[in-house]
Amino acid sequence: MKKGFCIVGAALLLFAQGYVSASIDDSTPPSSQPASGGRGWELIWSDEFNGQELDSSKWSRQVSTKSRNPRWDKGIHDWWWKADNAFLDGNGKLILRAEKHDWNTLYCGSINTNNIYEPQYGYFEVRMKAADTSKAVHTAFWFQGDNMGDIDGSGADGAEIDVFESAWVGDFTKSVVHIDGYGSNKQANTKRWNAPGIHSGFHTYGLEWTEDYLKIYYDGQLKTQYTNAKWIPQVGEYIWLSDGASFGDGDFQSQQNGFLTDAEVEYVRVWQKDTSGEQITNDSGQAVQYSEGWGSWSGNPGYQNDSHYCNTPWKWAEFTFTGTKAVYYGFKRNDLGIARIYLDSILQTTVDCYSSQPEYFVPLYETPWLPYGTHTLMVRVINEKNPASSGNEIIIDAFGSFNEYTADLNEDQKVDLLDFSGLALGWQDNYNLQQLSELTAQWLLE
């Protein structure tokens, strides 16, 4: 009876928080997380490209009504996106095919989610194999905003975000954010980064997009980021996959007419941060206490543009919260060290804050779900560091806390929550969410 009651309580929590099953491909592993790692991501949309036909509830093929920009230096006088050049191969892959139609004409494939799915913020991941750039064909994973053409000196109202374009034959690529249209007022911010093996086999490309930054990942590794608000869209954008005429390297003229090369896509997956019920406390909040030896730093790209830092061994920062869970947010850089983490005065683990590329407002440690009550989470500086790091400094950016229990049920507790929806909603008259939260947490922890 206790078990059934608590499952109903968990069901009520999910329904009360607006839990909705989004457009997720049935063959996407439900536990999948971004290749870059991290915690707290909730899968909300995906396509694994199974079957014989492109899913028209998620994608539309792009068909050119006139030639796109010619590449005169490549001998490509006109090139077009054609419906027949974007298709599924029947073996779990989207194919974007490039063909030499005649001596100076290129046909390519393109699909996007325009007017179908235009999310705002999240983590977007594509696993794909780029087309052969040496044949003057480049592959792109990008986003477009409906109002990108509005001229206001900002990308807040929409931008073109090029996560990558494989227009060069070397082991590198570039990310670009375009704003203010494509006319005389256009602006662009280009960042080049190394991409080992980009022209060989499949690779995973990721975009983490929040109101504060764009982060670009390649095979799970952070490659570059945008933190200036000028370049960060604050509106929904649609996803775009395409190949086209290279504006960089490649030889088109010497190729035979007919098939040139394919770009292949294994999946597209989208996650949103599961922050339901999370309260963020800045590093300077009253609930955060510091031993002597910590300094404060304003004007950085962290949460609310400030943080605390310390490199003196055994100095500590302590966050006191009332609830069921907490998260420590810090920085990762090539000069940061290793910290010890304590929960209610008990050593839990260590966290390595080293990264070859700087990352800000990063969740470095997340407590397990706890009985509802007052708890303390301590971060302690120690004289240890990753061998690749040049220092042992630790940074406190913020802490997150939760006061409801929303953990996943284990295998023995999994039920079809829809079967309990009517019964669960009936408990609202006698139990509030906080009570159900505490009861469910207590039962699952026993």
Image: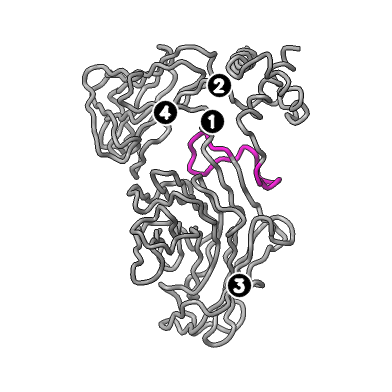
The amino acid sitting under disc 2 is Glu
| Residue identifier under label 2 | 404
Q: Quadrant of residue 151?
A: bottom left
| Residue identifier under label 1 | 276
Does label 2 or label 1 sit earlier along the sequence?
1
The magenta segment is 22-42
Task: Indicate the secondary structure of the residue bearing disc 4.
Answer: strand
Spot occupied by residue 380 in the image (x, y as percentages of width and height): 33, 20
Residue sitting at 51 percent across and 45 percent down?
123
| Residue identifier under label 4 | 280
Residue sitting at 27 percent across and 37 percent down?
335
Is residue 260 in sight in this rendering? no
Does label 4 or label 2 sit earlier along the sequence?
4
Spot occupied by residue 215 in the image (x, y as percentages of width and height): 41, 48
Measure the C-alpha gap from mark 4 to mark 2: 15 Å
Spot occupied by residue 255 in the image (x, y as percentages of width and height): 53, 82
Residue that extends furthest to the bottom in the rendered view of this protein: 103
Q: Quadrant of residue 392?
A: top left
Residue 415 relative to residue 107: left or right? right
Mark 4 is surrounded, within 10 Å at the Cα level, by few (under 14), some (14 to 19) or many (20 or more) other residues, namely some
